[in-house]
Structures are given as C-alpha cells and as structure tokens.
Amino acid sequence: MWPHFASAGNPTNSDTGVSTGDSTHSQEARITEKNQAGLLKSDPPPQLTDSQERKNLIERLKRLNDANKVGYVYLLGPQGQLVAYYTIKGKVTSLNSYLTTSQQVACQSPDSSADKGCVVVDSPDLDGSYGKNPEGIFFFATNGAMVEWAGNYMYSDQPLNLTTKPILIQNGQ
C-alpha cells in the first residue's frame, strides 16, 4: 500500500494519506490519486513470471563480456554521416569507466563519523592524476589500434550495410 504522509496545517487526503493543502494543484492531486486507485483496483498490473527485458539485458551482457568477440563500430558525424568504420575485438567502453572509485570519504580524524567532519573528495586515478575524462568511448580495433571517439556511434555484432547520402547545405543569398 502507499505510504501515508501528513504535515501540520494541511488536510490529509483520506484515500491516500497524502497532505495536499487547499490549492487547485492539491485538488487535482486528489482527483489523480483517486483515479489511480480506481484503475489499480479495476486493472491491476500483471504479476510477471518471465521478463523479456531481463533476458535481453542478460544476453547483451553475455555477448559484450567476451574479450574475443568481434564487433563493428560505425562512427557518425553530427548530421549522421558515416565518418569511419572499424572491426573491433572486445567491446566499446566509456572513457568515464574506472577500475577504482572516483570519489572517497575523507575525515578529519579516524574516529569521525559521516556527520562529523567527513567530506566526499575526488580520488586520484591509478596513474596519480585527478580530473574527469572527456565524454566519449574507446575500443580496440582488430589490428590492435586503440581508438577514442567523442561523437555518436553505432555498434553491431554483425557487419551492417550502411550508406551515407550526401548532405546538401545551401548558402542563403
């Protein structure tokens, strides 16, 4: 069931227990809550025994977590034009993925608790440097080259037959 909230001075909706006040918005909120309660009663969500979403996520993880998997990356320009195509080994990785935590809790003394003199600070990377990486991806081509890209891309585990139409830019005169 839904949690019950109330605050001093505001009426509580008897159907939901939520404090709503006297504004038009609160009247709309009460109507919405009552409508939703009726819909949940007349058309409750189904209890699934199987999840295609979870199966898709599991299959994707299995495919991408294979170091010897051959894949295909298509790097795209700002208007969607094909800029480059690579056959890769492994998976595409975010430049902002890290092997260790990017932040840590630092306290003024070892016996400090989180609410007494402790703050969250950036951690150094394993190479001792600080800072955020640029947005983008990297991957390893089958020839061993590491490629970084900061634009849009498509990945496929099978080669795609892509064609790029010319982009016409008209100079207004």
Image (tube, rainbow, N blue to C red):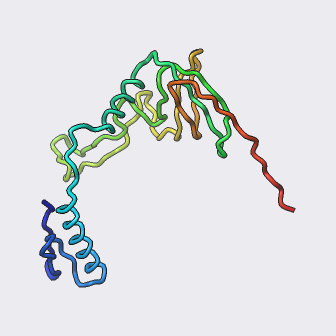
Q: In the displayed structure, would residue 22 be above or below residue 143?
A: below
| Image-quadrant location for residue 146 | top right
Horizontal side, residue 59 vs residue 144: left or right:
left
Q: Which residue occupies 53% across, 38% down? A: 136
| Image-quadrant location for residue 16 | bottom left
Q: In the displayed structure, would residue 132 be above or below residue 18?
A: above
Q: Name the spot of residue 3 as percent of width and height, x first.
A: 14, 63
Q: Which residue occupies 22% across, 43% down? A: 48
Return the residue nearer the eye: 37 or 95: 37
Return the residue nearer the eye: 126 or 109: 126
Q: Name the spot of residue 145 as percent of width and height, x first.
A: 59, 19
Q: Name the spot of residue 134 as percent of width and height, x first.
A: 53, 40
Q: Residue furthest right?
A: 173
Q: Which residue occupies 81% across, 54% down? A: 170
Horizontal side, residue 12 vs residue 93: left or right:
left
Image quadrant for the N terminus?
Answer: bottom left
Horizontal side, residue 127 vs residue 13: left or right:
right
Q: In the displayed structure, would residue 55 be above or below residue 114?
A: above
Query: How many numbered discs, if any?
Result: 0
Q: Which residue occupies 34% across, 35% down? A: 101
Q: Name the spot of residue 131 as percent of width and height, x first.
A: 47, 40
